[in-house]
Image: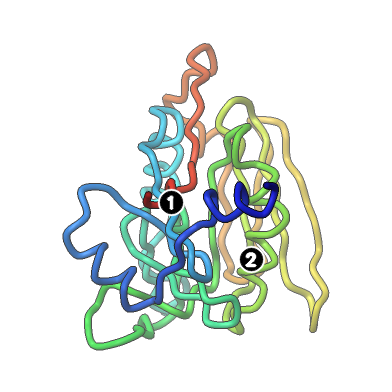
Amino acid sequence: MQLLEANKTQKRTYTPEEYLALEETAEYKSEYHDGEIIPMTGGTTNHNRITLNVCRKFPYTIKGQPEEIFAADVRLWIPATRRYVYPGVMVIQGKPIYQGKKATIVTNPTIIVEVLSKSTEGYDKTDKFRFYRSISTFQEYILIDQNCYHLEIYAKTGEKQWQFTEYDSEYDIISLASVDFQFTLSELYDRVDFSKIEETEIEEIKPEE
């Protein structure tokens, strides 16, 4: 009886090719996690404001080195763990390296920024960070709380070594390790209304009957 019930709830798995084909015509974005397709819901207003502030603040060049910054809609392929994900913000030094012929999937971020919610914070800090660390070009991970002044940075210092720094005052000055660049915490939270606390969730797709 228990085995029968388990079979009823068994999830369907998809190949990367099937996922990409479905994404071409999908009405909403989904991520691909080693066979599973996980739909994403819309973000909150605070989440969106912080994301836009990051993009507005980050320059296109730093000391002559071209930077590319991408937000939300650009997909990242993580080959080591067979995952297609949509990071909040990605910064690429130099030119993007794409998977495939289309300019829709990148593979070489230097910095990844995620805006946290209560429903995704644990995942962003643990498994998702572990997946990101398998990317050879990845050097810096920035986590921003959308409900209060709080930012965490993990900067790569060596093979399998990362330095952790956190900031919780609007007057704090954040210095990045992977690029020569600074900004204040207050700049990232410009126009953010902490009285409007909302949540965004990612739910797994239900298996087909």
The residue type indicated by label 2 comes to Glu
**Residue 86, how many percent across, how many down?**
42, 58
Residue that carries the numbered disc 2 in the rendered image: 140
Q: Residue 147 location in percent, x, y?
A: 59, 26
Of tags 1 and 2, which is closer to the observer?
1
Residue 207: give its label: 1
**In the depicted structure, whether residue 186 falls above or below residue 182:** above
In this picture, is 10 found above or below 107?
Answer: above
Of 61 and 159, which appears nearest the observer?
159
Q: Farthest residue toward the left?
A: 25
User: Residue 134's spot in the image, x, y percent?
Assistant: 65, 78
What residue lies at 36% left-to-right and 61% top-to-bottom? 70
Q: Looking at the image, which is closer to me, 95 or 76?
A: 76
Q: CA distance from mark 1 to mark 2?
A: 36 Å
Marks 1 and 2, the one that precedes in the sequence: 2
Q: Nearer the viewer, residue 117 or 31?
A: 31
Under tag 1, what secondary structure?
loop
Residue 163 % position (x, y): 81, 63
Q: Please give the name of the residue rendered at 55% of the width and 32% of the height, measured from the top-left corner.
A: 146
Please tell me in which quadrant of the rendered image residue 116 appears: top right
In the displayed structure, does residue 116 sit left or right of residue 187?
right
* Residue at 37% over, 55% down: 30
Picture residue at 45% right of the left edge, 35% below the top: 47
Secondary structure under badge 2?
A: strand
Residue flagged by tag 1: what amino acid is it? Pro
Q: How many marks?
A: 2
The quadrant where residue 71 appears: bottom left
Q: Tag 1: Cα neighbours inside 10 Å, few (<14), some, or many (≥20)? A: few
Dot 2: few (<14), some (14–19), or many (≥20) neighbours within 10 Å? many
Residue at far front of view: 1
- The vertical placement of 9 against 172, above or below, is below
Q: Are marks 1 and 2 in contact (CB under 8 Å)?
A: no
